[in-house]
Image: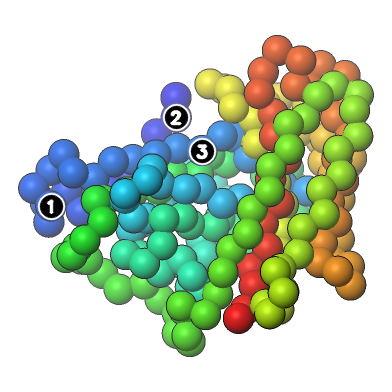
Amino acid sequence: MARPNPPPCQPYTPVNGGGSCRQVSGPWVTAPDSGVNVYTLNCPSNTQAVNASAEFSGAAYPLGIQVGGGFRPGVNQAFAFEVLANPVPFSVTFQPWVACLPRGTVDLPFRAQGGGTAEAFRIHVRTRRIHPRRHVRVRLGCPRGQRLVHSGSAVGFFTRRPPSPRVINAIRRRHHHHRIRSGTRTDVTAPAGVGDNERVELQVTTFCLS
């Protein structure tokens, strides 16, 4: 298993006496050609997300970590990771990590960047298992009374090693995320051998404003 550098728990270990901060990793994530590359990673129940990091396969590409909106440290249970380049000119593969602390009063060693009314944003996530040579379509929007302000998707490989460049490029060409009137529509068709002996998932995320 890869390890991010620096570890997301590093700023909190001295503050919380060590041992209370738990580092949680997600799958190896690949980005679609559309450039709308969002993966949401949750902390376990009764904990809160306070910091994030990522391990990249091959090289350190720019990665934007969404900590605004409903994802302020100490407020929510999840962080959303988004690749900055749009459109993505290369095959980006990374493993997201979050630092999770028990809920309650936390002495945060830093304050997240960004302003606005963070509490107004809500996240909605839907996942579907990917199987070889099968088409997957996910539609996701916002509940009544909420407005869609941003969305994205990603494919996650729950494997010890990152997928090969051949597999990444093959699935990127078949992965499309679109914003439509009723919300979003995401399509993926897995090539042969993807999802047969390992867990592979499509995840779609929408950011909604009350």
- Picture mark count: 3
Q: Amino acid at mark 1?
A: Asn
The answer to which of 20 and 157 lies nearer the viewer is 20
Q: Amino acid at mark 3?
A: Gly
Mark 2, secondary structure of its residue: loop
The reply to whether callout 2 and callout 1 are in contact (CB within 8 Å) is no
Q: Does residue 87 appear in this view?
A: no
Q: Which mark is residue 2?
A: 2
Crowd rating for badge 2 (residues with CA inside 10 Å; few <14, some 14–19, many 20+): some
Mark pair 2, 3: CA separation: 11 Å
Q: Position of residue 154 (x, y in %)?
A: 70, 46
Crowd rating for badge 3 (residues with CA inside 10 Å; few <14, some 14–19, many 20+): some
Mark 1, secondary structure of its residue: loop
Establish if 187 lies above or below 209: above
Of all residues, the one furthest to the front in this rendering is 144
| Residue picked out by circle 1 | 16
| Residue picked out by circle 3 | 26
Q: Earlier in the sequence, mark 2 or mark 3?
A: 2
**Quadrant assignment for the C terminus:** bottom right
Establish if 127 lies above or below 191: below
